[in-house]
Image (tube, rainbow, N blue to C red):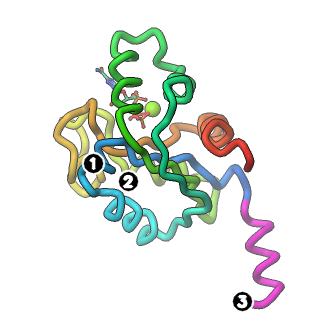
Amino acid sequence: MNSTSQSSQAENSTLANSTFIMCKPDAVERGLVGEIISRIERKGLRITALELRTPERALAEAHYEEHAEKPFFGELVDFLTRGPVVAMVVEGPDDNTFSLMRTMIGKTNVDDAQPGSIRGDFATITNENLVHGSDSHESAAREIGLWFPAR
Ligand code: RTP
Ligand code: MG
C-alpha cells in the first residue's frame, strides 16, 4: 500500500462509520466466535479493535443502562458477566455500519430472527442470542467509549 492510500484510509476511518459489536458469553462458550468474525469479514467490514474479556458487573450494567428498569435487567447482567465476551469495533465504508450489522445479527426475539442472520442460524433462546450490535450512531459512540475508552 502506498502512502496516499494509507492516508486516505485513515481519513475515512470515522466514528460515524463504526459500530460496537460483542460476541456474548454464549458465543464464546459454543465456539461461534470464528463463525461470527468470519461473517463480519466476508460482508466486507473491518474489525478495528478487538478484546476478549469478562466484563465487570458495573460495565455490563452501564452497557445495558437503557434496560435498567426492565424486569429482565438482573438476568441480562448475570448472563453478560458469566464469562468472557469478545468486544469489537467494526467499521465499514459508510455511516450505515451499525444498521448493516443489525441486519446480519437478526431480530432480538429468536422466533422472529430470519435464517441467514446470525441469531436465525444459531440461536434458540432470546436471552442467549449470541451477538450484540449498537442500535444507532449515538449508541455506537457511547458503547465504543465505554468498552474502548482509549480510542
Ligand atoms: P442487544 O442489545 O444485546 O444487541 O439485543 P437487541 O438490541 O436485539 O435487544 P434489546 O432490546 O437491546 O435487549 C437486550 C437483550 O435483552 C434480552 N431481552 N430479553 N425477556 C425479554 O423480553 C427480553 N427482551 C430483550 C435479549 O437477550 C436482548 O438481546
Ligand atoms: Mg440492544
Q: Earlier in the sequence, mark 3 or mark 1?
A: 3
Q: Is residue 127 left or right of residue 76?
A: left
Kind of residue sitting beneath label 2:
Met
Percent coordinates x, y for residue 69 in the rendering: 46, 9
Helix, strand or loop for the magenta stretch, by majority: helix
Q: Does residue 135 appear to the left or right of 11 in the view shown?
A: left
Give the Cα distance between marks 2 and 1. 21 Å
Residue 104's disc is: 2
The answer to whether the residue labelled 2 contacts the one labelled 1, judged by CB atoms less than 8 Å apart, is no
Q: Position of residue 23 (x, y in %)?
A: 40, 48
Disc 2 to disc 3: CB gap under 8 Å:
no
Q: Quadrant of ligand 2?
A: top left
Q: CA distance from mark 2 to mark 3?
A: 30 Å
Could you give the CA–CA distance between mark 3 and mark 1, rounded to whole angstroms?
A: 38 Å
The residue pinned by badge 1 equals 29
Q: Determine whether 109 is above or below 27 in the image.
A: above
| Mark count | 3
Report the span colored magenta: 1-13
Residue neighbourhood size for the residue with mark 1, other residues' Cα within 10 Å, grouped as few (<14), some (14–19), many (≥20): few
Residue topped by disc 3: 1
Q: Nearer the viewer, mark 2 or mark 3?
A: 3
Determine the residue positioned at 55% across, 57% down: 50
Look at the numbered disc 1 and give the secondary structure of its residue: helix
